[in-house]
Image (tube, rainbow, N blue to C red):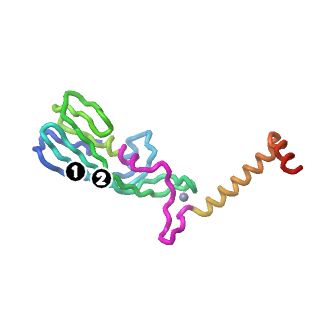
Amino acid sequence: MDQFAIQFSNLKPGVYSFEFEIDDTFFENFEASEIKKGKVNVMINLEKQSRLMVLDFSVKGFVNVMCDRCLEDFDFAIESAERLIAKFGNEKQEVTDEIITVPESDHEINVAQFIYEYIHLALPPKRVHPNNERGDSLCNAEILKKLEEHKGKEIEDQLEDPRWEALKKIKFN
Ligand SMILES: [Zn+2]
């Protein structure tokens, strides 16, 4: 993950930009990652000041996730912007989600963990296939049909359950 280390000690105050291309191998470095595949472009605008650095991340691309409706994997488009403020201090510390302190004696800041978090934050809680230009869902219709049938079958099975007998009697009497 060395390629995600930004050397800042030799930077004069000013604005610098960095670009990273994230692919599947990136997510292999994070065992707990919900995302295993993706292609994401990350642009970082870094403004170095005397006592702190402001890092503006622009995250844009696709990550492969499972659709909550048809359960098929698909490429979900993500796009987000996040700001990180790194203050120079005595020790490495996370002050808030947005503010960290970085020892002034450090030479570099590794942004891999932040990129990882920002990509996950860009995902909404519910992920479903988008609609096409005609407004039709791009979900796998075959799978949706099977899921519907399965749901019907489950209800039938429940009705076979002796615990449902009483209910059935009420229903059919
Ligand atoms: Zn779907």
In the current view of this chain or complex, which residue is farthest to the right?
Answer: 173
**Residue 147 in the image, given as x and y percentages of width and height:** 65, 55
Q: Name the residue under label 1.
A: 45
Percent x, y of residue 7: 18, 42
* Magenta region, residue range: 116-139
Amino acid carrying mark 1 in the image: Asn
Confirm or deny contact between disc 2 and disc 1 (CB under 8 A). yes
Numbered mark located on residue 89 in the image? none
Q: Which amino acid does label 2 sit on?
A: Ser
The stretch drawn in magenta includes residue 92: no
| Residue 67 image point, x, y percent | 53, 54
163 displayed left or right of 14 = right
- Specify whether tag 1 is near ligand 1 (CB below 8 Å): no
| Residue 118 is one of the magenta-drawn residues | yes
Residue that appears at 44% across and 47% down? 35
Residue 3 spot, x, y in % from top left: 26, 45
Give the tally of numbered discs.
2
User: Residue 85 versus residue 92: which sits nearer the camera?
Assistant: 85
Q: In which quarter of the image is ligand 1?
A: bottom right
Mark 2 = which residue? 58
Q: Which residue lies furthest to the left in this view?
A: 12
- Decide which of tag 2 and tag 1 comes sooner along the chain: 1
SS assignment at label 2 = strand
The image quarter in which residue 143 lies: bottom right
Q: Which residue is drawn at 40% across and 41% down?
A: 30
Left or right: 62 with respect to 126? Answer: left
